[in-house]
Amino acid sequence: MFVNSYSGGNNETIRIGLVGTGYIGRCHAIAYAQVATLFPLKANIKLEYLAEINQNLAEQKAKEFGFAHATGDWRELVSHPNVDVVDICTPNFLHKEIALVAIANGKHVYSEKPLALTADDAKEMVEAAKKAGVKTMVGFNYIKNPTTQLAREIIQNGEIGEIIHFYGTHNEDYLANPNTPIDWHCYKDKAGLGTLGDLAAHIINMAHYLVGEQIVSVCGDIQTIITERPDPHNPTQKIQVENEDQASTLIRFSNGVMGTIESSRIACGRKMGLTYTVTGTKGTLIYTQERMAELKLYIHNDTPSRQGFKTILVGPTHPDYAAFCASAGHGVGFNEQKSVEIRDLINGIATNNSIYPDFEEGYNVSKILEAIMISAQQRRWIDINYSS
Amino acid sequence: MFVNSYSGGNNETIRIGLVGTGYIGRCHAIAYAQVATLFPLKANIKLEYLAEINQNLAEQKAKEFGFAHATGDWRELVSHPNVDVVDICTPNFLHKEIALVAIANGKHVYSEKPLALTADDAKEMVEAAKKAGVKTMVGFNYIKNPTTQLAREIIQNGEIGEIIHFYGTHNEDYLANPNTPIDWHCYKDKAGLGTLGDLAAHIINMAHYLVGEQIVSVCGDIQTIITERPDPHNPTQKIQVENEDQASTLIRFSNGVMGTIESSRIACGRKMGLTYTVTGTKGTLIYTQERMAELKLYIHNDTPSRQGFKTILVGPTHPDYAAFCASAGHGVGFNEQKSVEIRDLINGIATNNSIYPDFEEGYNVSKILEAIMISAQQRRWIDINYSS
Amino acid sequence: MFVNSYSGGNNETIRIGLVGTGYIGRCHAIAYAQVATLFPLKANIKLEYLAEINQNLAEQKAKEFGFAHATGDWRELVSHPNVDVVDICTPNFLHKEIALVAIANGKHVYSEKPLALTADDAKEMVEAAKKAGVKTMVGFNYIKNPTTQLAREIIQNGEIGEIIHFYGTHNEDYLANPNTPIDWHCYKDKAGLGTLGDLAAHIINMAHYLVGEQIVSVCGDIQTIITERPDPHNPTQKIQVENEDQASTLIRFSNGVMGTIESSRIACGRKMGLTYTVTGTKGTLIYTQERMAELKLYIHNDTPSRQGFKTILVGPTHPDYAAFCASAGHGVGFNEQKSVEIRDLINGIATNNSIYPDFEEGYNVSKILEAIMISAQQRRWIDINYSS
Amino acid sequence: MFVNSYSGGNNETIRIGLVGTGYIGRCHAIAYAQVATLFPLKANIKLEYLAEINQNLAEQKAKEFGFAHATGDWRELVSHPNVDVVDICTPNFLHKEIALVAIANGKHVYSEKPLALTADDAKEMVEAAKKAGVKTMVGFNYIKNPTTQLAREIIQNGEIGEIIHFYGTHNEDYLANPNTPIDWHCYKDKAGLGTLGDLAAHIINMAHYLVGEQIVSVCGDIQTIITERPDPHNPTQKIQVENEDQASTLIRFSNGVMGTIESSRIACGRKMGLTYTVTGTKGTLIYTQERMAELKLYIHNDTPSRQGFKTILVGPTHPDYAAFCASAGHGVGFNEQKSVEIRDLINGIATNNSIYPDFEEGYNVSKILEAIMISAQQRRWIDINYSS
């Protein structure tokens, strides 16, 4: 089934194979449905194939999400000649295997984050993709929000001067209740890291995107507060949690800029607590994803008696917003930033241009996450080696 | 072209004919594109026909929005046998004519607000629809926002006691600059009323929706501040503005509840200033559309030393949010509330159930707007007659 | 007992006689204690005499507040040769009687608001003071807050252009609980009006202060929601409430500017809900007394993509703040605005200059309040006659 | 000259000697002026002696602040038999010398923060005071704000469960402009540390106060961004800045709780950026000193669909607020928290009870600050030794 696609005369069609239809897979499906109406794409999109853990579920979801074909075996999908892009929305531990087979079959790969369970795995994926010459993308969707694009524009314009400090968080409370049964997020072999892999990955990518420099040194501290949780199949039994609940990290960027990154999955009250405060020599930006349509901007050389943080409501004068609405202040939602991401994926493939964030960035983030973990274990600063 | 439609086994298909593709027509197109992926609909949707002012534009927009056929003549669309619903997104002065022809052809009609230029016109439309037995809907989309649905749920649960006061605004600043050239919004024969028709209509409908009672008396005051504006074709010439820039109105609901409604199209800084403060005997709700994903709730019988307004981030425990995202705080946008509206339209037609807000509500709002205008001219309270 | 007074070489001493030591009387005492350390006054202050309802209470409070002499009979105080200023902090119904005797004795009079129970009473007081040539002041303290002084400065500078709309509220919830026993606020012969006299008086004065024009027409609506309350001496008995709980009013200023004023004493959650939104042709100011150290300012001719409300934290570059602290953002409290008021009182008397707000303004506010009451009863607009 | 003092029958008088009348000395003077009217003190206060750098200035300030005697030589004051408490408001480098002489003369000592330029100096002061048996207090005034007292009460009640994370900042922008001439804050021999001593000291004390545990390990990172500044006497010449502009630190409390503390004196837009987010297993508190009259509280076991941060306006049901005002939401200012501090000082002396925060706490804070500095230099975690 074709999604409506306004491709400006170009007749190419990019055929999507989606693996996994849980939380984030459904978000992808929503974005695929609307993207061609929102943006003038450089190619048509065809929702070709959908894989789930069994045929029945796959067929139900294919119907629900508008995919033409369904399979209970992801290997069928990733090797199918009619699939151009493999979109991986499975639990973390499957990313690597699926991606490598897809790449081996010459498919472009669009993977959710974190790219892999370890930096070594991520490296293998980067190298395979490079060798095969396929395009890659990692779903660090928060940098696609028009409001955050505006933040980057302000920084790049020099409106807040030279950046001197970055404070970023990604805090949520989805595991705050100790009676919440254990799930795959809490196991090393399924999720790898805990809050670092699930949440901190986003704010690290955000730091790179906003500051425009790599994080090169870290010193982290981590804790698992809720050390065991109920067995979902037998709630009176407790099972050991294998990864960290919260992490705080001092960072340095390649240009020497200082910063701090915090992350928690048990931070009561923070529902979508991705936040940043970027301080420059001439001004400051403050943002929280919970108010994703507004940005606070302070400019130090305003008249002293008229200084203050200005609350800018995102609107059609800002990047990519006009696609959603012609008036300011009408809001943007999670699915809309995901649509920008898919627009970038499709156009990057159609025009054979680079895509950001790609697997390289996914690998860099993995390196940083591992360095944080090591620094926390060894209670010292760790430098990240980008040359390897 | 079919939009993906997950209709739960029902094979009915509802075919849409869209008239007008400007600002709001495009919003409809986005919502049509995503609605079937978001919600389990009771029928399939087919984007059948699109009309614009000429064939070329119609064809371009049909391609862009994914409609199967295009026409430069709306009369062709509204009489076409393959169209089930006529969706009217034209300037206000055309609503009535198009709707009446569509109804005469047995089509269901989905019209943007305000329903018509006068209450008499609106009445004619209501009666025609009733006689023809077709379904109708008016695009008062703000009541479809999950956050506002939550507000209504809180009120209906009695959580803030009996309502004793409603304060609502719909202020924007799209005409705040006196050098903005005149456009159709400023002419009586094109727009009817000024800010009352364009903006106050929304907050009046919102008052009905939240308080659950009709407004029965009004006393308004209006002003045109910028009395002439540049001719867009000859900016050195000024043309007279024919309707009001701002309006403030005291209201009473059928149950005696007091309130105030304010509206302006020149309210500097208010980009999407639809706001409400609903005060009850036991609590209060405060909301602004500029932060459309959060609601402030105060409960008076909290422990005195722990009283305060609670900021609730809309999430999957609230009405209709889970369709967009499985996690709280991930935001909702304008297009998402429009998708809820279209879900209600499609399901109402498919199941032959009543739809809200329908033309009757559109007519009621028109009566109230006219009463405000008369009360302002006569500087006295006006009661609204709902029996006629 | 002398309060410390830095009077810049001037040796005059102004001797204060305070009548009433309840809620607001205590606030006056705090302000007297600190004012001379805060501001370089034009005269010394001596806390000479304090009157309460009996000698014991008077003596206790005199000690507590640092007054030299105490009396259980206010008549003794207002006629005492050592008293220069009579400061009236009694319940409303006593203001007139005490003021008239004080004036007859040649005392300057500083009265809490509302000035009197009726406009006629207020007029009598104004005329008596004028005839006697004494100075007067009414305790509309909210206009003395440095943040609100900044708002006025911004308006007077023309920074937001011509004012086109004023929205003001003074909402509180001190009587929101229907089980709160009746007190003097609810009786006509003790308080006069209800929320209008107690709270709306402040926001009306604020409107005059900010807009710089008189309110000349009003159309109000009022309601008593909790019509009876427990007898404090016999809670199972209910006693009739005699005045209004809430009031909403359309207003026009002398220059034609529109506005709306709302007031309630049962507005759940509003603890200090004096707020204003002043809209001009070029910008907007938004303020709430609950965040009395910050002002939101929007300037429409900012670069479109950088428009937004700026949150200005009050600081030493703003009027009268430096007296409290040399750094911005360190906060101001209720007692500090009262200190500014007393500074104005003392300096006005010492230099024989006009004081604002004086009894004339108190009388004007009373006229407006009565007009609102009449307009609500007669359900029509009422013009205020300032010539009488 | 006596300040008014309501001492509840106790006839003791505590005589104050104030050394230094700059920024913070003036704040002390304001608080002395009002404290006895605000609180029922356990002793009278007499403003006995004031010292400044020369006799003229001392006399002028004594008159302005209401002190009976003045001197240009602080040694005269600290040894005068009529002085009971020496209140030190000088630049940092003088704290130690003055305090030691005062202690040697048997005076109680009330010193502004930081207690001394080094931890060793602070230790000497603690030991001298202990040996002499005099009372001591350090001016960490922010913990005296009623709102912050409420935060501590909530934590101690267990309302947010066990504390699991503390994030605190004290950021300001008083040196953000690189053209601001150098002053004593920037020299090691005058100020000691930079932002750590001036600002971080407050948030470290706050962490102790709120969490109720000592910080025992730190890992800090610091930077001087503006490395040289204009010579105030010859602006074309630049002088080297000798201490840090910004500092970020990972911390651990004695009970293992993690945290992060950040401080900057060049943080554009932060005027009074002392903030804390205290996360517990059952809830979270968020506060910023820029809105010092409100506290945000989240309780995780609220009904899921009614969860959210509640904004509590400080009022008479909270600690020490009723002294300032009988109604909630009327605001508190910097000088009011200073009055609470002085109330604690006077009552601690009068009743011979312990005072908090005393020199011991000042010394602990100094140890932590030094450990941060060393950890930043050595790029490793440092444990703090409290046994020495």
Image (tube, coloured by chain):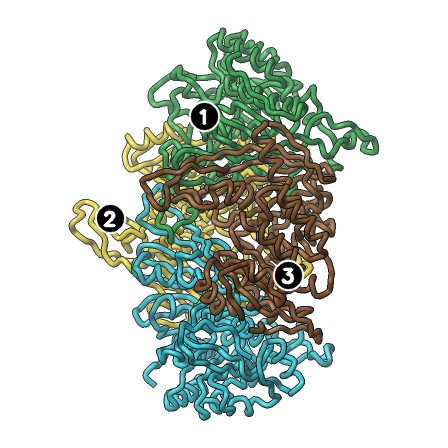
Chain colours: A brown, B cyan, C yellow, D green
Q: Quadrant of the C terminus of chain C?
A: bottom left
Q: Do tags 3 and 1 sit on the same chain?
A: no
Task: Give the mark nearer the N terminus: 2 vs 3.
Answer: 2
Quarter-of-image position of residue B50: bottom right
User: Where is mark 3, residue-wise?
Assistant: C300
Q: Chain of mark 1?
A: D
Residue type, label 1: Asn
Q: Residues within 10 Å of mark 1 (few under 14, many from 20)?
A: some
- Cα–Cα span, label 3 and label 1: 53 Å
Residue A120 location (% of width, % of height): 64, 41
Residue type, label 2: Pro
Q: Residues within 10 Å of mark 3 (few under 14, many from 20)?
A: many
Mark 1: which secondary structure?
loop
- Cα–Cα span, label 2 and label 1: 49 Å
Mark 2: which secondary structure?
loop
Q: Is residue D45 above or below residue C175?
A: above
User: Where is mark 2, residue-wise?
Assistant: C181
Q: Quadrant of the N terminus of chain C?
A: top left
Q: Which residue appears farthest toward the right when viewing the image? A: D236
Q: Nearer the viewer, residue C367 or B260?
A: B260
Q: Residues within 10 Å of mark 2 (few under 14, many from 20)?
A: some
Residue C74 location (% of width, % of height): 33, 38
Residue D312 location (% of width, % of height): 42, 44
User: Does residue C120 show up?
Assistant: no
Q: Residue at x 39, y 72 (%)?
A: C380
